[in-house]
Image: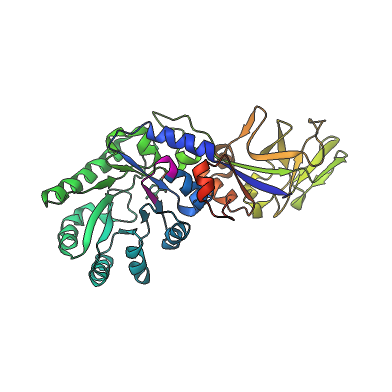
Amino acid sequence: MSLSWVEIDLDALRHNYRQATSRLGPRTSVMGVVKSDAYGHGMLAVAEELVSCGAVFLAVSKYWEAEELRRHGIEVPILVLLGCESDQVEPALQSGIRPALFRMDHARLMSKTAVSLGIHAPIHLKVDTGMGRLGVPVDRIGGFLDELLSLPGIVLEGVLSHFAVADERDKTFSDRQVDRFLEVLTMIAAKGWELPYAHISNSAGILDLPHAHFQLVRPGIMLYGSPPSTELHRPAQLRPVMSFKSRILQLKDVPPGQPVGYGRTYVTDRASRIATVPVGYDDGYFRALSNCGQVLVRGRRAQVVGRVSMNMITVDVTHIQEAREDDEVVLLGSQGKERITAEELAELCGTISYEIYCSIGRHRHKFYLNASRSCLDRLRPGVV
Ligand SMILES: Cc1ncc(COP(=O)(O)O)c(C=O)c1O
């Protein structure tokens, strides 16, 4: 029995996938974003489910993630958002891994490698339409395209960009990004190139910007059950995929005036019952939740009191008389009618749900619930 564990509900993942696809027209496909261990949910199991749901592409950040997907038999094309290092170009091209392209020296190397292998190099060109981060700026795309399309072996399979503020209520800037993206697509068409995939929409774009779906969309956070923000015009009915659970390790009745935890930051003001729960910041439970987080015990909320330490928290369960040692404690997820969401934890920690999932998702003990039959058959031992 683990002291604490993370549960991943793959039925909820499938539900969220359907929520995404229900917003898409018949000509738009899904590139499931499974970077950063599928936002902490476990890249291999999530990728298997997404592919069985119908995702035609997957996106990761780093080449080794794509390699790992291939090693586990995932065959769909994979986009590496951060591109590939020079020594990764040849194996990438040989295994259908598509590096995002944003530098001409990378393009030349890919062309040379493709020619020497006698194959084509399908690439996705990253365009900066206003994020100001990775990508060829729109005002320099003309010259870039001229050289790119003249390189032997290069096949421009996709053009992508990324929204900066699609999750905000005001869509003025996102619409400007779409316009710049369209300019690039028009330029490509004018050069006589028939582009298979244009893609710019993340979860917020899928939900709120139907005119920006093009041939491919890249949902991340909505697949994992969180809205990209609270400002959406057309939110979806999503189901959280991740839960984080533990047990009461010890229950203690203490008198008024008892300090609790490092720094004695909490002192009981009445006779109290304190539960020690074996979860701490090493398990991804942020230290910022000291004296403000809540957990669920016997279907009721209980306050974290004192500091979150590396491996333990202390919780005031005085009002839950029926609480017992070994009772389940829910730190993220639902119990009875109550639920602790990643948004609630994020708000308390001054961050976003994405970071909560990535942090808790690093937990060593992860259990997958409701895997589809086809995924169970394909997953090799040790994956779930
Ligand atoms: C390039 C790119 N596309 C798509 C996504 C998915 O975004 P979201 O999780 O907001 O749907 C991300 C995530 O950060 C990304 O970096």
Which residue occupies the foreground of this view, 212 or 319?
A: 212
From the viewer's perspective, tell me whether residue 175 is left or right of residue 339.
left
Q: Residue at x 38, y 31 (%)?
A: 22
Which residue occupies the foreground of this view, 36 or 7?
A: 7
From the viewer's perspective, tell me whether residue 365 is left or right of residue 264.
left
Q: Position of residue 238 (x, y in %)?
A: 49, 33
Q: Position of residue 350 (x, y in %)?
A: 55, 44
Furthest residue toward top: 337
Q: Is residue 355 visible?
A: no
Q: Is residue 56 magenta?
A: yes
Which residue occupies the foreground of this view, 100 or 30?
A: 30
Q: Which residues are magenta?
A: 52-58
Q: How is the image coloured?
A: rainbow
Q: Position of residue 210 (x, y in %)?
A: 31, 33
Q: Is residue 206 visible?
A: yes
Q: How many marks?
A: 0
Q: Residue at x 83, y 36 (%)?
A: 272
Say which quarter of the image contains residue 347: top right
Say which quarter of the image contains residue 315: top right
Q: Residue at x 37, y 72 (%)?
A: 87
Q: Residue at x 11, y 52 (%)?
A: 191
Q: Is residue 365 magenta?
A: no
From the viewer's perspective, tell me whether residue 93 is left or right of residue 293.
left
Q: Position of residue 157 (x, y in %)?
A: 25, 53
